[in-house]
Amino acid sequence: MKVSTFKTAGKFSLLVLSLLVAALMLVGCSGEEKKEAAEKAAPAAPEKITLKLAMDADPVSLDPQVQLSGGMLQFSHMVFDPLVRYDKDMNFVPRLAESWERVDDLTMRFHLRKGVKFHSGNDFTAKDVVFTLDRLKKSDDFKGLFEPFSGAVAVDDYTVDLVTKKPYGLVLNMATYVFPMDSQFYTGTDDKGKAKDLILKTDYSFANENESGTGPFVVTSREQGVKTVFTRFKDYWDKDTGNIEEIVLSPIKNDATRTAALMSGDVDFVMPVPPQDLDRIKSTDGLQLVTMSGSRIITFQLNGKRNPAFADPKVRLAMAYAYDNQGVVEKIMNGFATAAGQMSPKGYVGHVDSLVPRFDLDKAKSLMAESGFPNGFEATMIAPNNRYVNDEKIAEAFVSMMSKLGIKISLKTMPKAQYWDQFDAQVADIQMIGWHSDTEDSGNFFEFLSMCRNAETGYGQYNSGNYCNAKVDELTLAAQTETDPAKRAADLQEAEQIQYDEAGFIPLHWQNLSWASKSNMNTEDIVNVMNFPYFGDLVIK
Amino acid sequence: MFAFTVKRVLQAVIVMLIISFIGFAIKHNFGDPVRDLVGQRVTAAERAQIRERLGLNDPFPVQYVRFLRDALHGNLGQSYFFKKPATEVIVKKAPATLELVFCAALIIVVLSVPLGIYSAIRPKSLFSKIVMGGSIVGVSMPVFLTAILLIYIFSVELHWLPSYGRGQTVLLFGWWDSGLLTADGLKHLIMPSIALSSIMLPLFIRLIRSEMMEVLESEYVKFAWAKGIKPWRVWLVHAFKNTLLPVITVGGVQLGIMVAFTILTETVFQWQGMGSMFIESVERSDTSLMVAYLVFVGIVFVLVNTLVDIIYGLVNPTVRVAGRQ
C-alpha cells in the first residue's frame, strides 16, 4: 500500500517536472527564434527579387472572364495582357495591339504584336483574339459590356477587326478588357470530360484552375484565400519593364493587420491602405504612400415615386444645398475623398468643371420655404454599413444635415449581403449607392444610375430614385452611337449639367485610392486611377 | 450502458437536426449569394437565372430536404466562392484551427497549473497578488485588442515575430497542413496562441486557485500535515490531485468556447483556419459554406460531448450522468 502510493506520487512529480521542463524549453525556444528573426532582418543577399504583396482580397478565379470585378482585373493585368491599356492620364497605350485605325463606322482594325508567346508556349495570333471575344460574349459578367459588338474577324494572323452592330464610340475602352486567352490551351476537354473553355462561377472548371496568358507573370502556385505565387514569364514579349521575378500575394482582410504587416516588413506592398493609417505610413521612414482621387462616385438617390416630396425639384435642390460635401470629406473621410458635385470625375469626358458642390444652408432653407413642403416632411432611408468607406457614418451625417430643413429621416443600415435585395426592392425613399464606371466613361453612370428605368432594355437598372428626364436619356443614347469624341463629350456634359440643375440625386464624393510600399520601388509609376497596378513594370532598386 | 449509449446517440442526432435546421433557416433569409458572384452590370434577369441554376429559388422545404438528403451522403453543399465542395474546404482549413487551439491549450495548462497552485498556497504573497491582478486585466481585455497589441509590440516595434499568416507548413498524411514542424511555422504560432489563450488562462488560474484553496482547508489535508508529510507532497499529491477533477470538467467545456474564440483571433492574424473562413463566408454570403461550417462544428461538438459522456460513465461509475439510472 505504502509502496504503491509512493509510486503514483513518483509518477506524478515526474509529470510535473516534465511539464516544467517543457515550459522552460518553450521559453528557451522562443528566445532563440527571436535571435534568428533578428539575423534574418539583417540584409542578406536575396536570391531573386520577390515582391510580397498584401491586398484585402485575392482573385476569385484564374479565369479572367468569370467575374467582372476590380480584383479580377488586377489579376488579369498580371497574368494576361490586354490589347490596349490606359496610362496614368487615361490615354490608350498599345500592348498586344501595336496600332489601330478606324476602317469604317462599324469597324476598328487592330495590328497585333508579332512574336508574342503564351505561357503554354503557343504563339499569339489573331485567332486568339477572335476566340477571346467569342468567349467574352458568353460570360455572364462581360456579355453586357460586349453587347454592342457583333464579333471579331481575323484579317490575317496579325490583324484583327473588332466589328460593332452600330457605330460605337467606346471600342478602345472595351479593348482594354480584351485579355487574349490561349485558344489552343482552352480548347478541347479536360480529364474530367468537361469543355476547357467552360465559364463556371461556382464549380470546378478547367479555366478556373489553369491559365495560359501572355502576361508578365505565370501563376505557379495558388491556395485560394491564402497565398498565390506569380513567377516572371521568361518569354514575356516586353523586355523593357520591371525587375520583379516573383510575386507572393497574400490576402489580408483585416485593416490593422495589413498595415502592421507592411510596417513590420513582412510584406512590401499593400493595397488599399486603411484611411486611419495614412498618416502613420506617411511618417514612417522607408515607406511610401501613394494616393489618388478615385473614380467611384457615392450618391444618395431620392425616390419621387415613393415620397411625393422628392418629386418636387425645389425640395431636391434644397437638399443638395443643405449637404456639406466638403465637411463630410474632411471630418468623416479624414480628407481621403474628393467632394463631388456631379457623377463624372475629372478626366472623364462628361466632367464639367463648373459643377462643384454647393453647400449653402441659407439658400437651402429659402428653397425649402418656396417648395410645396415649407414645414418639412418625413422620409425613410437605407444605407449599407460595410460596402463603402464609412458608409454608415456618412448616412448619419446626411440625416442630421437634413434635419436642419425640417426633414425627418428614419435611417436603417445593414450589411451589404442584405442591402442589395432591399435596394432593388426600393424599400426606402432615400437609398445610397456607389458606382464605378466599368467603361471608364461618363455614359455608363447615366445608363445605370440616372436614365429612366426600363426593365426591358435594362437602362436605369440601379436608378432607385426613379429620376427620369427624357433629355438625359436622349443624350446618353446619342453618345452611345457617337464616334466623334468632341460630340460625345458635348452630349455627356449636357446630360451632367441637366442633372445638376434638377438635383436628380445628391452626389457626395469620389473615394480616393491608396497604395503603400517600401520606398525602394517606383510605386508611383505603376498605379493608376482604375486601381490596376501594373506590377509587370515595378522596379525594386 | 448500451441503453445509455443509444440514448445519447439519438439525442445527438436530434441535436444535429436542430442545428442544421437553424443553420438552413439563416441561410434562407441571409441574402443573395449571387450578388457576390457577379459584377454590377449583370441584370436582375440574369441573376435570377443563376439563382435558378443554383437551386436557390426553390421553396424552403424543398431546399432543406435536398440538403438533408445530400448531407446523409456526406455532401454539405458547394462553396460558391471556393468552387469546391464545402466539406473539402472545411477539412482543408481544420488543421490550422486545431493546431492553434492545441497550442493555446498547451500554454494554458503549462502556465495555469503552477501559477494557480502557487497563488493558492501563498495567497498573501506579492507575486500572487500580481498574478491575480493581472488575471483581471487578462479577462477583461477583448481578444482582438490583445492580438493587435501583440502585433504592434512584437512585429511592428521589435520585429521579432511575423505579423500574419501561418508561415511555412509541412504536409502530413497527404492532407494535414502542419505548422508545428518548421521553425517558421512555430514562430507564426506564438502570438496567435498567446492571444487565444489570453481569455482562458486567467480563468483557469482563478479556478485552480479557488479549488485548491478549498481542498487545502479539507480534513484529509489537515491530517496529512499532522502526519508530518513534506509540504510539496501535501500540495501536489494530496491536494492538487483532487483539484484536478473539476478543472478537467470545466476545461472540456471551455475547449469548445475556445474554438469559437478563434474566429476573432484568426481574423486579426489572418490565420487561415475555419474561423476566418466562416467570417469571410458570411461577408461574401457564401451561404452554403456557412451552413456547412455550422453543421460541421455541430457534429464535432456533439461527437465530443457524447464521447466524453460515455467515457465518463465508463470510467467513473459513481458519476451520475444525465439519462443514466
Image: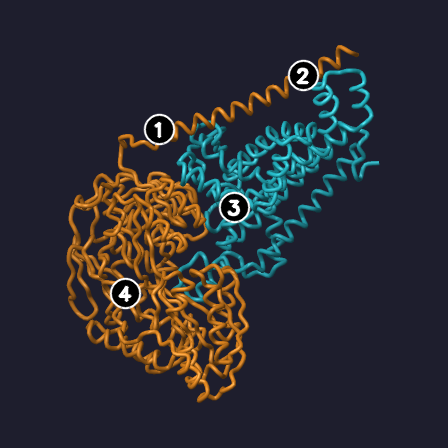
Chain colours: A orange, B cyan
Residue B112 percent location from the top left of the image: 62, 31
- For label 2, the SS is helix
Could you confirm whether marks 4 and 1 are on the same chain? yes
Quarter in which the C terminus of chain B is drawn = top right
Query: Could you tell which of marks 2 and 4 lies nearer the N-terminus?
Result: 2
Q: Are marks 4 and 1 in contact (CB under 8 Å)?
A: no
Quadrant of the drawing holding the N terminus of chain B: top right
The answer to whether A228 appears left or right of B28 in the picture is left
All told, the count of numbered labels is 4
Mark 3: few/some/many CA within 10 Å (<14, 14-19, 20+): some
Gap in angstroms between the C-alphas marked 2 and 3: 41 Å
Q: Position of residue A435 (x, y in %)?
A: 38, 65
Residue matched to label 1: A39
Q: Is residue A411 above or below residue A48?
A: below
The residue where tag 2 is placed is A11
Amino acid type, residue under disc 4 in the picture = Ser
The numbered mark at residue B145 is: 3
